[in-house]
Amino acid sequence: MNKIALIVGTMVLLAAAVGAVLFFRADATARVMAEEDAVESIIGLYPELEAYKTTSLPPSSIITKQLGTGWYVAFIESGSGIPGILTARCYRVSETTRVEQVGTFTAQGGQTAERMQLETCSPIFSDEQAPVATSTSTQPGNSGILPYGNTTLRLGERAQFPALSVKPVAIEEDSRCPSDVQCIQAGTVRIQIEMVSAQGTSTGILKLDEVFATKTESITMVGVEPGKISTATTSPDAYLFTIKVVPQGLLIKPKTPGECFIGGCSSHICSDTKDAVSTCEFREEYACYKTAACERQRDGACGWTLSAALTSCLAAASSGTIAE
């Protein structure tokens, strides 16, 4: 009788063990997110990306790559009549539907990407050689040396200018107000940079829109991407810092009038580039630029002049009370 009870008990335990294994396998399988769910999780945070699901001009598409139980997703805009990728916005979605922006890409100087590496949002060019940094200046320069002007860098990337090289080393602060939150203060970004010149190697803290002066150059961080949103986090490797380096005394050097151009799909970009290209998405603040002046600013760069009317319009657009 004891033998029978022992056998029955053993069989019950085996059955329970097998059932537990099957349950955990089924549960693990259930946690694998569907590709469509990953895409929709991102679009839920960024509704403007909905347009990438349909054929449009310029051509747009969505590419994905599975990451364990989650996904890498990139929203791609290709050239219309121009081969290659113009812009890309890359995200990582975990099995819990947590969305993290990996980075962004925008073609510079007419050099479009052949494809994207989704894990880092890095462009892969047809010759497999991505540039170290891209300068928006039009001055000629030697091979490997950027002309003075703007350059965009990630952490650890170095840009060599005629008499100085600059490398972002670490993010010290990113207190920018998320675009989906109303804040009392706009916040700022501070990064640590490494500078190498004839005087040696030194480090300093670069604050957004504030000039950092060396003995021979002036350095300013004039832009940071991607924008901040409260429901998503950005990994340090995904940050793109636009840094302006010019010789001392050239920050307010005026340029010839008439060199500023209005561009972008919504005519919202004021720059040195004629027919500047952008993604086609409309925001309320873009309407404010219809009557604004696109002209050379005190720092020598093209930009919208912040008149009282423009400032008031932008504030109304930010609060959602812009007049029709």
Image (tube, rainbow, N blue to C red):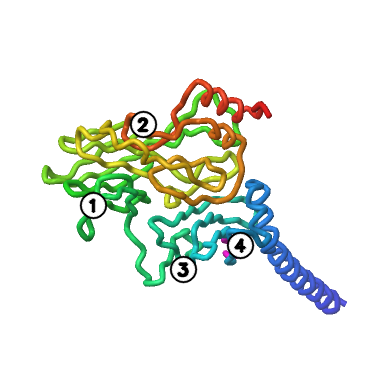
First in residue order: circle 1 vs circle 3: 3
Does residue 219 show up?
yes
Mark 3 is on which residue type? Answer: Glu
**Residue identified by numbered label 2:** 297
User: Depth-wise, is mark 4 or mark 3 nearer the camera?
Assistant: 3
Does residue 255 appear left or right of residue 28 in this picture?
Answer: left
Crowd class of label 3 (few under 14; some 14 to 19; many from 20; radius 10 Å): some
Callout in the foreground (2, 4): 2
Local secondary structure at mark 1: strand
Instruction: Name the N-terminal-most of marks 1 and 4.
Output: 4
Q: Of marks 3 and 2, which one's residue comes earlier in the chain? A: 3
- Front tag of 1 and 2: 2
Amino acid type at image mark 2: Gln
**Could you tell me how far apart the alpha carbons at marks 4 and 3 are, in whole angstroms?**
15 Å
Q: Is residue 71 magenta?
A: yes
Magenta-colored span: 67-73
Instruction: Identify the residue under disc 4.
Output: 62
Q: Is residue 109 left or right of residue 311?
A: left
Pointer 1 residue:
160
The residue sitting at 46% across, 33% down in the picture is: 175
User: Secondary structure under badge 4?
Assistant: strand
Which mark sits nearer the N-terminus, 2 or 4? 4
CB under 8 Å between discs 1 and 3: no
What type is the residue that disc 1 sits on?
Gln
Across and down, in percent, residue 85 comes to 49, 63
Percent of width and height locating residue 8? 84, 75
